[in-house]
């Protein structure tokens, strides 16, 4: 049985005072959870606060992006080693907002993925199709391309220390969740694709669903055989909502 994982993605939201109340609410709400791992991925400036507050709790933390470079003249960028200094376990890579708004392509995301693995961070690789792509029935093709770019760069073994998040772009922040069956179909596709290369890694691979996950729809989504938890945007900003989703993992 794979453990469930629920990760909050705060995106570019937060303020010191608000974060403190939110983190305290999350910590106390999930302290008794045994079979679900919980984490929050926060904006860089809050990593110090998160490290101080979450240290010793059962909530892990991480960042939402990072540079593929170890150091150098890259103004505005943040290196993997810097995330480690703040105790990060996870780093989200290839989120559709990075792909779409900041034009990060498969090749760059693969370089970042490789750098994360090398640093000992656990990448949460986001994949997913746009509405046009779903309508054109090329969802599997798109997800396969996004996944294959990573495997080609780092090899299938690297997935042992990684998480995949299937996030259909049309479901992110829209209130339109993929149905449990729609999500399950893509999750199964991802697992089968990895299984063709390494059955054991595929079996252990944690595949999260993301896109308008709420307390109300989380239990049904998380009960699907290939859905191992969620990547949560909007609902991760309200402690009781995020805690309820973490609890839905059982
Ligand atoms: P959402 O965001 O839960 O607000 O749809 C999910 C994500 O982008 O990770």
Image (tube, rainbow, N blue to C red):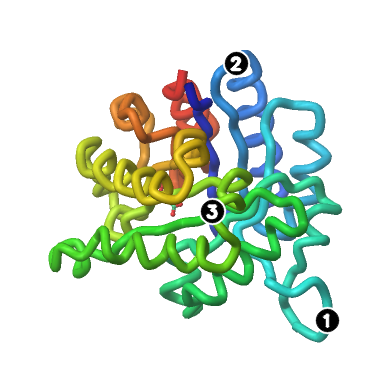
- In the displayed structure image, the side of residue 226 where residue 179 appears, left or right: left
Label 2: element kind: loop
Q: Position of residue 159 (x, y in %)?
A: 56, 49
Residue 72, which numbered label? 1
Q: Quarter-wise, where is residue 230 in the image?
A: top left
The residue singled out by tag 2 in the image is 34
How many residues crowd around disc 2 within 10 Å: few (fewer than 14), some, or many (20 or more)? Answer: few
Q: Residue at x 31, y 41 (%)?
A: 188
- In the displayed structure image, the side of residue 27 where residue 84 appears, left or right: right
Q: Residue at x 68, y 72 (%)?
A: 68
Q: Position of residue 219 (x, y in %)?
A: 34, 25
Residue 156, which numbered label? 3
Q: Residue at x 66, y 43 (%)?
A: 19
Q: Quarter-wise, where is residue 100 in the image?
A: bottom left
Label 3: element kind: helix
Foreground mark, 3 or 1? 3
Q: Is residue 42 visible?
A: no
Q: CA distance from mark 2 to mark 3?
A: 29 Å
Q: Earlier in the sequence, mark 1 or mark 2?
A: 2
Foreground mark, 2 or 3? 3
- In the displayed structure image, the side of residue 169 where residue 233 appears, left or right: right
Q: Earlier in the sequence, mark 2 or mark 3?
A: 2
Q: Is residue 209 visible?
A: yes
């Amino acid at each position: 049985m794979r453990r469930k994982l629920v990760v909050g993605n705060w995106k570019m939201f937060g303020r010191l005072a608000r974060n403190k109340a939110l983190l305290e609410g999350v910590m106390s709400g999930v302290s008794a959870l045994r079979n679900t791992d919980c984490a929050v991925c926060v904006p860089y400036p809050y990593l110090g606060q998160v490290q101080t507050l979450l240290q010793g709790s059962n909530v892990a933390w991480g960042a939402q992006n990072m540079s593929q470079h170890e150091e150098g003249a890259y103004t505005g960028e943040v290196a993997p080693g810097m995330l480690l200094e703040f105790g990060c376990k996870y780093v989200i890579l290839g989120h559709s907002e990075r792909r779409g708004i900041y034009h990060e392509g498969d090749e760059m995301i693969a370089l970042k993925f490789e750098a994360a693995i090398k640093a000992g961070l656990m990448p949460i690789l986001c994949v997913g199709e746009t509405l046009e792509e779903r309508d054109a029935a090329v969802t599997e093709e798109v997800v396969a391309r996004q996944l294959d770019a990573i495997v080609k760069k780092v090899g299938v073994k690297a997935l042992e220390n990684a998480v995949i998040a299937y996030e259909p772009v049309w479901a992110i922040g829209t209130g339109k969740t993929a149905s449990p069956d729609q999500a399950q179909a893509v999750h199964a596709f991802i697992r089968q694709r990895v299984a063709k290369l390494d059955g054991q890694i595929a079996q252990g691979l944690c595949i999260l669903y993301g896109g308008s996950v709420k307390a109300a729809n989380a239990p049904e989504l998380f009960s699907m055989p290939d859905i191992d938890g969620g990547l949560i945007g909007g609902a991760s900003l309200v402690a009781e909502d995020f805690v309820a989703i973490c609890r839905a993992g059982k």
